[in-house]
Amino acid sequence: MTTTHHTPDLFALSEIRGPVLRPGEDGYAEEATGFNLAALHTPDVIVVATGTDDVVTALRWASATGTPVAVQATGHGANFPIDHGLLISTARMTDVQVDPERRTATIAAGAKWRDVLKATAPHGLAPLNGTSTDAGAIGYTVGGGLPLLGRTYGYATDLVRSFQVVTPDGTLRETDPTHEPELFWALRGGKGNVGVVTSLVTELVPLRTVLGGGLYSSGEHAEALLTAWAEWTRTVPEEMCSAFGVLRLPPIPQLPEQLRGRFWARVAVTWTGEPAEAEQLLAPIRAAAPVEVDMVEEMPCTDVDRIYIEPQDPLPARESCSLLRDLTPDAIGAFLGQVGPDVPDCPLLVAQLRHMGGALSRPARTEDAVCARDAAHFLESVAVIGAPPDAEAVERATTSLHAAMSPYSTGRTMVNIHGTPGDATDRARAWTPEVHDRLRRAKQTYDPSNLLRFGHTV
Ligand SMILES: Cc1cc2nc3c(=O)[nH]c(=O)nc-3n(C[C@H](O)[C@H](O)[C@H](O)COP(=O)(O)OP(=O)(O)OC[C@H]3O[C@@H](n4cnc5c(N)ncnc54)[C@H](O)[C@@H]3O)c2cc1C
């Protein structure tokens, strides 16, 4: 596969209804900049798509000129620079249509989970969004989508009924389990390797409220709380979704006042069962360490950003992840040896273990490319990258944490939270060798010229 750098002939793009922007033009920098400021995109041209037609035209042009293509909705996954070629921005394509009878939503390419929740909530229905409703629904879902409510309902991609997708040759295709099944398979966990999705249809779950929030103890209690939580996760029903994290929160006004500028050990929970039952279930966690801030409460599904208090403003972030087989006492020791209270200068903002299992461990109705169903826990780390030498310290701490946890890992990552895509061997870690080979074959079919070559490619 060859790399071609073209100076694009923009005349052919004149049919595009949305703005077509070149470096230096008004709006170019705003459109290129995403949520994660770690990677600065400088493509030769940005097509700001207003609908499916624009995506088709842009890809036909890219195919005719051999121009490499990337797609961005929100830039939550912007952890690699797009430094040439065409960037298709789907940020204007935010339409969400709900069919309450069928319990489905049709979600356009640029919709954030927040847009979807706004449309589904009046019907008492909810999608399988993740910990931040600011993330794009499509980018998240094509990466498998590890939801807040994953133990109860499975991966977001498990509920997808169909995609409308434009393959790099500019062909608009509809795919579902019976139409182009290999394309349907590759779009559920294979990330953006085979096409640009313009919309998808997903099932929704009947849910108006959840009980959720964080139980915050001082960071010095991390070992007691983590040990109790690890034990507790072996016993809880599938309606209980939770994570243990150590958080080194900066003293910034964007955070709730009582949390600012402190080192915390936190158990965050989301409970989809009867609220009254949760009290008893949470007792062992509340007893494991003194809870200084208790934010667990019943809330509408539209308010779930309160549970993990993810950043809502753009920042330069370095994320990484590992899938763990089991959280043994040795694994707990290794984790705390990297990020616990005895590592006072640890530069990671968050190091968090999410409880997997339940519906996350069962196969999807229709086979897909998600390779995380054998994991008991999911480790994710996030740091805000400052200027050097901070950047090097962040890189060292990130690498060191995941290396220390490798004896307990399945050896794989999750493509959505893999972080900076490295070389081919590093990128392949998001899938089993069999799924990776099959994805490569699907890419050969749908993107033989490797136009979609940026980022986490196979
Ligand atoms: C604060 C925060 C919380 C998060 N929480 C979770 C979580 O709980 N669970 C989880 O699974 N992930 C989570 N993520 C990761 C998130 O799912 C990924 O960053 C995802 O890529 C976001 O999609 P996006 O479209 O918003 O990002 P973008 O940066 O716009 O796109 C990222 C990539 O997604 C693909 N993509 C986007 N649009 C399309 C399209 N139309 N067609 C084909 N491919 C496309 C492309 O490969 C693109 O490079 C979180 C990220 C952040 C920053």
Image: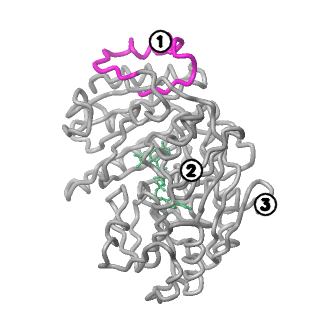
- 261 drawn magenta: no
Image-quadrant location for residue 364:
top right
Residue 387, position in %: x, y?
20, 58
Q: Position of residue 312 (x, y in %)?
A: 34, 45
Q: Earlier in the sequence, mark 2 or mark 1?
A: 2
N-terminal label among 1 and 3:
3
* Location of residue 365 by image quarter: top right
From the viewer's perspective, is 204 left or right of 395? Answer: right
Pointers 1 and 3 in contact (C-beta within 8 Å): no
Amino acid type of disc 1?
A: Glu
Which residue has dot 2 on it? 96
Asked whether 208 or 228 is in front, the reply is: 208
The residue mark sitting in front, 2 or 1, is: 2
Colour convention of the picture: one colour
Q: Which residue is mark 3?
A: 179
Q: Residue at x 47, y 53 (%)?
A: 418
Secondary structure beneath dot 3 equals loop
